[in-house]
Image (cartoon, rainbow, N blue to C red):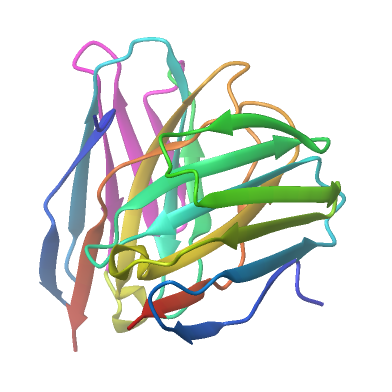
Amino acid sequence: QQQVKQSPQSLIVQKGGISIINCAYENTAFDYFPWYQQFPGKGPALLIAIRPDVSEKKEGRFTISFNKSAKQFSLHIMDSQPGDSATYFCAASLTNDYKLSFGAGTTVTVRA
Amino acid sequence: DTAVSQTPKYLVTQMGNDKSIKCEQNLGHDTMYWYKQDSKKFLKIMFSYNNKELIINETVPNRFSPKSPDKAHLNLHINSLELGDSAVYFCASKLQGWNTEAFFGQGTRLTVV
């Protein structure tokens, strides 16, 4: 049973465009929501993370928006670049829990 | 310096064989994981160790056996390999705590023929 649902499965965006990936969760006890970026042939790497007491977090061209009441969070990639082409995973974890539950992943392709 | 290193990077073997994947981290972390990534890129947690103690053991066939000789190492042994075991296996490590960053190795692509 997947605890974090992620959409879309894939998306294609033109260079300079905005990529938006959405995630939804059911367990209201989740209190840490990271996003991981994975390039082909590499392991996932932390991109940006947010806690539920914050509605938005921005790091460079990457922004997480968090809607606690809707139990949803999303990643926005502004001014998308070909180098952003990768698979993005949202994830969630509980306090005092070692487990990180991942979404199914979104493959982003940025066309030059 | 590689933070989380796995060996081998590629492993091709026949059905029924037994194989091991090794993982080492030099980050001083106390928690290590094994994840399986299938052909659809879904990341599924398999095991986790904290200070050499098994703390997560997901629904995984008992042909898979992890071993943590010390905090810096976590190995995965697989007996009687099956076609369905073909996947990329990732080792990861982090400091204990709910909001600490997990660092992943480069993965081991296992192909069972």
Question: Is any part of residue B87 visible from this angle?
Answer: yes
Vertical arrangement, residue B47 with respect to residue A112, above or below: above
Vertical arrangement, residue B32 with respect to residue A69, above or below: below
Q: Say which of A23 and B103 sits in front.
A: B103
In magenta segment, residue A111: no
Q: Residue A12's quadrant in the figure?
A: bottom left
Q: Residue at x 57, y 16 (%)?
A: A95
> With B41 as the anchor, is A19 left or right in this view?
left
**Picture coordinates of residue B21, whole percent (x, y):** 63, 69
Q: How many marks?
A: 0
> With A107 as the anchor, is A35 left or right in this view?
right
Vertical arrangement, residue B86 with respect to residue A92, above or below: below
Q: Residue at x 45, y 77 (%)?
A: B109
Q: Residue B22's quadrant in the figure?
A: bottom right
Magenta highlight range = A53-79
**Picture coordinates of residue B15, whole percent (x, y):** 38, 76
> With A76 as the anchor, is B54 left or right in this view?
right
In magenta segment, residue A56: yes
**Picture coordinates of residue B89, whole percent (x, y):** 49, 64
Vertical arrangement, residue A84 with respect to residue B59, above or below: below
Q: Say which of A72 and A9 sits in front.
A: A9
Q: Residue at x 19, y 52 (%)?
A: A20
Quadrant occupied by the C terminus of chain B: bottom left
Q: Say which of A80 and A31 sits in front.
A: A31
